[in-house]
Image (cartoon, rainbow, N blue to C red):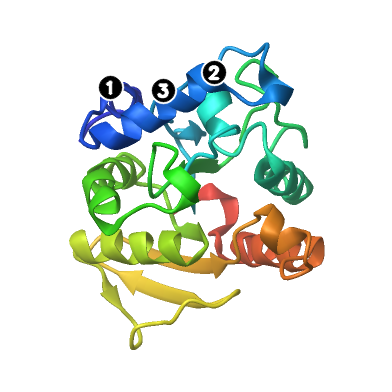
Amino acid sequence: MRSLNAIETAVVRCTRCPELRAYAAHVAREKKRAHRDCDYWGKPVPAFGDPHARVLIVGLAPGAHGSNRTGRPFTGDGSGAFLYPALHRAGFASQPQATGRDDGLTLRDCLITAALRCAPPQNKPTPAELRNCLPHLLAEFDALPDVRVIVALGAIAFAAVSRVLRARGFVFDAAPVKFAHGAELRATNSKRLVAAIASYHPSRQNTNTGKLTAGMFDAIFEKVKSLLPRGGGS
C-alpha cells in the first residue's frame, strides 16, 4: 500500500495520456483572459484532503481554468464555488472559499479526488483515458482504509467508484444501481462496509439551471454524516 504522498507524486508525473498532458500544458500557456497574470499548474491534479478521511468525494476531471490553473481539485471555478461552501456547512471544510493552494483551506474527515486527473478537451474524457487513470483512484482507495462513504459527483464518477469497489472485491447488496441524484449503493468485503452516494455534479450547467440546488446538495452531505459510524470508529 502506497502513501498518499507517494500517490500524489505519481499522479503529477503521470504520462499515460500524452494528449491530455499536451492539452493541459497548452491551456496553461494560452491561459484565459481573466487569469492571464496567473501561473497555471498545467499538470495532472492530485487529491486533496484528510489522509485519515472516512469520506471520499470523487469528481469528474479538472476544469481547464479551474484545477488545471490552481493545482487543487474543485478550486478556482464555479464547481468549487458551489462544493466547498456545502462542505463547510456540513463541517467537512474549514472555510467556504477555495481560491488556490495557499488559501488556508483544510478538510476534516474528507478527501477529494477525481476519475480523471488531467483537464480533458470540452470536459469530455474518453473511455480509454478513464481506464488509464483508474489505477490512481484504486491506489488512493487502498491508502484510505477508514473510508466508509463515497460521494460520486456525476455519472462518470459514479461508474468509476463502482469499478473501484468491484476491483477490490466488494459485493453489492442489490442489483446494479443506475445513476440518479441521491442514488445509493452499499458494498461489503471481508474488511468493511462502504456506502456510495450519487449526486449531480456541481457544474455551472447544473447549478445555474436549478438542476442541483444548495438544498439538494446539503441533503447529500447530511446523508453522508448519518452513514458515518459514531465516534470516528470503523
Disc 1 crowd rating (10 Å Cα; few below 14, some 14-19, many 20+) is few
Residue at point 43%, 76% (across, down): 185
Q: Earlier in the sequence, mark 1 or mark 3?
A: 1
Q: Quadrant of residue 116?
A: top left
**Where is residue 205 drawn, in percent x and y?**
68, 59
Mark 3 touches mark 2? (CB < 8 Å) = no
Front in this rendered view, residue 42 or 121 = 121
**Where is residue 44 drawn, in percent x and y?**
38, 29
Q: Earlier in the sequence, mark 3 or mark 2?
A: 3
Residue at point 71%, 43% (across, down): 78
Residue 104 seen anywhere in this rendered image of the structure: no
Element assignment for label 1? helix
Mark 1 touches mark 3? (CB < 8 Å) = no
127 in relation to 111, above or below: below
Q: Which amino acid type corresponds to the residue marked 2 in the rendered image?
A: Tyr
Front in this rendered view, residue 32 or 83 = 32
Total labels drawn: 3
Q: Which amino acid type corresponds to the residue marked 3 in the rendered image?
A: Ala
Q: Nearer the viewer, mark 1 or mark 3?
A: 3
Q: Which residue is mark 3?
A: 25
Q: Nearer the viewer, mark 3 or mark 2?
A: 3
Residue at point 68%, 11% (across, down): 37
Whole-number angstrom distance, CA of label 1 to CA of label 3:
13 Å
Q: Is residue 100 left or right of residue 178?
A: right
Q: Which mark is residue 13?
A: 1
Q: Which residue is mark 2?
A: 40
Task: Name the image quarter holding the C terminus.
Answer: bottom left
Q: Which mark is residue 213?
A: none
Disc 2 crowd rating (10 Å Cα; few below 14, some 14-19, many 20+) is many
